[in-house]
Image: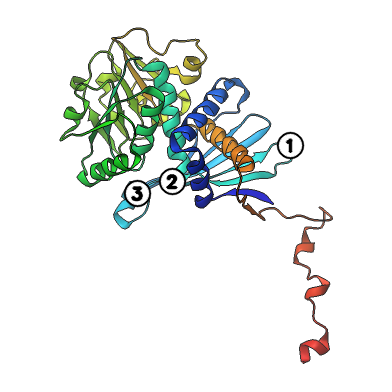
Amino acid sequence: MVDFIGIERIQELVARRGAARFIEELAAEIEADFLRWEAFDKSARHASHSPVGVIELMPASDGRLYAFKYVNGHPKNTAVGLLTVTAFGVLADVDTGYPLLLSELTLTTALRTAATSALAARRMARADSRVMAMVGNGAQSEFQIIAFHHMLGIRQVRLYDTDAAATEKLAANLALLRLPALEVVRCGSVAEAVRGADIVTTVTADKRNATILTAEMITPGMHLNAVGGDCPGKTELDRRILERADARVVVEFEPQSRIEGEIQQMPTDFGVTELTRVLSGQVPGRADAREVTIFDSVGFALEDFSALRYLMRIHQEERGSKPQVDLVPELNDPKNLFALLVPSPQSVSRPQEAAA
């Protein structure tokens, strides 16, 4: 039997901890894995693109455990009542190849993305950052705000989305959360939202090269958490922002970010720093209070590895039901797989019983 975490179980696990604590614990798990970067077999995700979206496989292994995530990105799905992003994942034992956990990762991906964003911002944003602009108020936005409020002390969020209904949804959810000392400001444009912000998070969904933030909007000392540009041909930042002399760009895994991130706009010799070097202290996340820092985040398989391992641990530790699925056969003779198709004696009727 294989441990299984479905939607009901992940709701239960998050509810018992609270979303803020869950994100912070997950961020610690992710940081621990980034700090043992060299232990991992790493590769850019395999992506299958179509005119309307992308389906991706994201593998990672530390030689003891192996994980992969299946994830899609289809921006037009919401028009027919479907999610833009769905995902599931598997954590397996390297020594036997047996799966240990099959888990939903749709909700968990939003949680781990927020955790990684806040983890990077703790090293890159100014310590006195209290105001964040949230540009793009869709499915990821609540998670980002919870993470930055809890882990960085954000006290005001400035909301903007081209879809006014998305902003109202986000504001209503934030009101339900009752986050202490958090002021929510609705804005009429990107420029208005960004004005006066210490941190700017962009998490838009359109699969295209876009200029969500222009160079003129950026002021010294800002931290940009660029989350939405995450596939070839999809960007959010004016390339002039990346070219600023006072800008520092941090990525998760450079070979993947060169294909999918904001830096796909830049020449191959454009200098970036991988997040592991910042977290380990090899490179500072910020040189001074006036530097513009950019976390060009596309999501990396190591973060899903961390999330799956964390989920398996708390799934096994937490009280309550612990669902499993019979995904792998259990055999008396491992060389006799066909035995699964041979009827057991109890299931075979005698001829006279069948005739009756």
Residue beneath disc 1: 95
Amino acid carrying mark 1 in the image: Asp
State whether residue 14 appears in this view: yes
Residue beneath disc 3: 52
Circle on res. 72: 2
Quadrant holding the C terminus:
bottom right
Q: Residue furthest bottom?
A: 356
Dot 1 surroundings within 10 Å: few (below 14), some, or many (20 or more)?
few
Foreground: 150 or 329? 150
**Mark 2 vs 3, N-terminal side:** 3
At horizontal 76% and vertical 63% (from top left) the residue drawn is: 340
Amino acid carrying mark 2 in the image: Asn
Q: Position of residue 144 (x, y in %)?
A: 37, 33
Residue contact at pointers 2 and 3, CB within 8 angstroms: no
Q: Position of residue 142 (x, y in %)?
A: 35, 38
Which of discs 2 and 3 lies nearer the camera? The answer is 2
Left or right of 190 on screen, residue 314: right
Q: Residue furthest top?
A: 288
**Mark 1 vs 3, N-terminal side:** 3
Cα separation between marks 1 and 3: 39 Å
Cα separation between marks 2 and 3: 11 Å
Q: Secondary structure at mark 2?
A: strand
Q: Position of residue 131 (x, y in %)?
A: 27, 24
